[in-house]
Image (tube, helix red, strand yellow):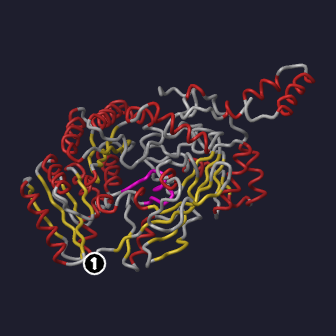
């Protein structure tokens, strides 16, 4: 047995003899480094035992002693709020609730919590804004939820270096307000309510992604608490570094399954000195999609480009969430930015020419700063407007399935069109929106409970179309709980097994956000 001295091996055999059984010997073999962490480069699900979890009550007792009872909530309202969201595509069962919600105030307190959970093998689900859409924070195992909402400060701002260090629960909208005083912006801008920790977790993007990139391109370093409570910082502040493995990239998009992000150092960008916003309407979604492809293919650098279909424009109009009324046709919402008016005008002329070539119906510009905000507001209220429409005009108990895929830009038009046509054909209400500058589009489907299977088929076909053109099952929402079966279709079994190997290396007891992204329990009924 490699790695064990003769004395150690002999001691176990002697212990077995004294006990009159072979337990100690067998236990040595079973729990040797080779069995706990096999020599293979990947970990197959069939080679694992089901995880065994401990009693969360023991951890809670010790946390009360260490942190005080004021940082622990066990009310039903709190447990429910940290298990589900109305707008999530997947929902927990009635018994999928945390035992308690813990509210740490520092990275060290998160470390204390994780050390105890590791010692007692208690599952943990990290939580910030709770805006995830794919069941990313469903507590599938009895354990605790760590809500970082008290960790929401800007820790360091370096305008001269264009970076900022923040805590995980800082909302991106609050950060944007702070940076505005310095004429700086942080690139990613997902839906309202999202926080930096969750944005890192799902590698989100938003409308500005076409210009500034996703979270992967905008995070310099992370402070992470690992499963056993170890605190690490992945990098220092330079924009580039070739020092060691890219651990920052490892944690971005890992959905809390490898560690809990408590702090992030983020890249900033200089706000454009001259800006404008335009709303361009088309008679059909195919023409709008072709215009977007031309923007990208001809190198027209816009600060943001969003597509909203005719249904979404109707939902926004009837919702009353915006002051202005929009043409109820497929619409591109565009942001222009540059260092001079001439630069912005050059962009606008290029865009107008491309839109005319693709049969646009109307082209509206913002005349004032207020207009800029209002013209863009339709995109920000899209999901809530869709939900409001469903409740008012379809059914008070209407459900919403909001999901996304991303495809090569040259195949965007056909995928958009086919998804939209299928929704109409099967009789489902809903809309399509997208950060189309990088081929990422979203379907927001309204359905009654009895139509869930029909809706699931539409989502399945939307994903199948994306994969058929070498796209991805999710552009920014993450895999979470609901898209695990689809991930298997996108990547090979060996890739899933490699991810599982990394998970087992960092979290051998499988306590961090269990069951997300890929299966960790061979008893789970998912084919991998």
Check the image and report above or below for 126 versus 465: below
Q: Is residue 415 left or right of residue 1?
A: left
Q: Image quadrant of residue 167?
A: bottom right
Check the image and report above or below for 512 versus 459: below
**Residue 518, image x, y percentages:** 50, 36
Q: Secondary structure at mark 1?
A: loop
* Count of numbered tags: 1
Q: Image quadrant of residue 403?
A: top left
Name the residue: 61% across, 32% down.
39
**Residue 100, image x, y percentages:** 66, 49
Magenta residues, start to end: 193-205
Query: Nearest the camera: 452 or 9?
Result: 9
177 in magenta: no
- Say which residue label 1 marks: 273
Residue density around tag 1, few if under 14, some if 14–19, many if 20 or more, within 10 Å = few
Q: Is residue 517 left or right of residue 73?
A: left
**Residue 2, image x, y percentages:** 73, 32
Query: Nearest the camera: 130 or 120?
Result: 120
Name the residue: 45% across, 56% down.
199
**Residue 439, image x, y percentages:** 27, 49
Q: Quadrant of the N terminus?
A: top right
Check the image and report above or below for 166 versus 125: below
Q: Is residue 210 left or right of residue 492?
A: left
Query: Nearest the camera: 230 or 430?
Result: 230
Query: Nearest the camera: 338 or 131?
Result: 338
């Amino acid at each position: 047995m490699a790695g064990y001295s003769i004395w150690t091996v002999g001691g176990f055999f002697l212990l077995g003899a004294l006990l009159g059984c072979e337990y100690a010997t067998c236990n040595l073999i079973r729990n040797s480094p080779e069995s706990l962490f096999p020599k293979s480069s990947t970990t197959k699900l069939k080679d694992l035992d089901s995880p065994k979890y401990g009693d969360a009550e023991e951890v809670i007792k010790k946390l009360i002693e260490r942190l005080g009872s004021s940082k622990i909530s066990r009310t039903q309202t709190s447990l429910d709020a940290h298990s589900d969201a109305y707008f999530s595509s997947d929902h927990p069962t009635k018994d999928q609730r945390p035992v308690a919600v813990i509210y740490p105030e520092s990275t060290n307190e998160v470390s204390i919590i994780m050390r105890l959970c590791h010692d007692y093998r208690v599952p943990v689900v990290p939580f910030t804004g709770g805006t995830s859409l794919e069941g990313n924070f469903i507590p599938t195992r009895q354990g605790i939820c760590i809500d970082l909402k008290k960790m929401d400060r800007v820790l360091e701002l370096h305008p001269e270096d264009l970076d900022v260090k923040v805590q995980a629960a800082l909302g991106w909208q609050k950060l944007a307000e702070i940076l505005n005083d310095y004429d700086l912006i942080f690139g990613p801008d997902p839906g309202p309510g999202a926080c930096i920790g969750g944005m890192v977790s799902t590698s989100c993007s938003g409308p500005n992604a076409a210009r500034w990139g996703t979270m992967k391109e905008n995070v310099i370093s992370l402070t992470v608490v690992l499963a056993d409570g170890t605190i690490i910082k992945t990098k220092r502040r330079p924009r580039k570094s070739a020092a060691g493995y890219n651990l920052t990239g490892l944690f971005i998009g890992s959905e809390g399954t490898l560690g809990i992000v408590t702090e992030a150092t983020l890249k900033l960008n200089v706000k454009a000195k001259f800006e404008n916003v335009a709303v361009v309407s088309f008679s059909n979604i195919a023409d709008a999609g072709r215009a977007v492809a031309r923007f990208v293919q001809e190198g027209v650098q816009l600060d943001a480009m969003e597509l909203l279909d005719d249904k979404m424009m109707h939902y926004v109009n009837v919702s009353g969430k915006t002051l202005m009324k929009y043409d109820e046709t497929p619409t591109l919402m565009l942001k222009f930015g540059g260092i001079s008016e001439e630069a912005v005008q050059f962009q606008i002329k290029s865009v107008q020419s491309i839109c005319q070539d693709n049969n646009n119906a109307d082209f509206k510009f913002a005349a004032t700063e207020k207009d800029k905000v209002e013209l863009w507001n339709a995109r920000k209220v899209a999901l809530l407007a869709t939900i409001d429409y469903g409740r008012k005009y379809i059914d008070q108990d209407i459900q919403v399935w909001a999901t996304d895929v991303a495809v090569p830009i040259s195949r965007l038009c056909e995928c958009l069109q086919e998804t939209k046509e299928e929704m109409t054909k099967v009789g489902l209400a809903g809309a399509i929106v997208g950060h189309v500058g990088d081929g990422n589009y979203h379907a927001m489907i309204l359905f009654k409970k009895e139509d869930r299977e029909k809706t699931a088929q539409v989502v399945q076909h939307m994903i199948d179309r994306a994969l058929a053109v070498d796209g991805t099952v999710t552009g920014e929402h993450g895999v979470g709980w609901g898209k695990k079966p689809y991930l298997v279709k996108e990547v090979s079994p060996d890739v899933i097994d490699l991810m599982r190997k990394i998970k087992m290396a960092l979290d051998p007891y499988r306590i961090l956000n269990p069951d997300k992204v890929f299966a960790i329990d061979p008893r789970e009924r998912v084919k991998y």
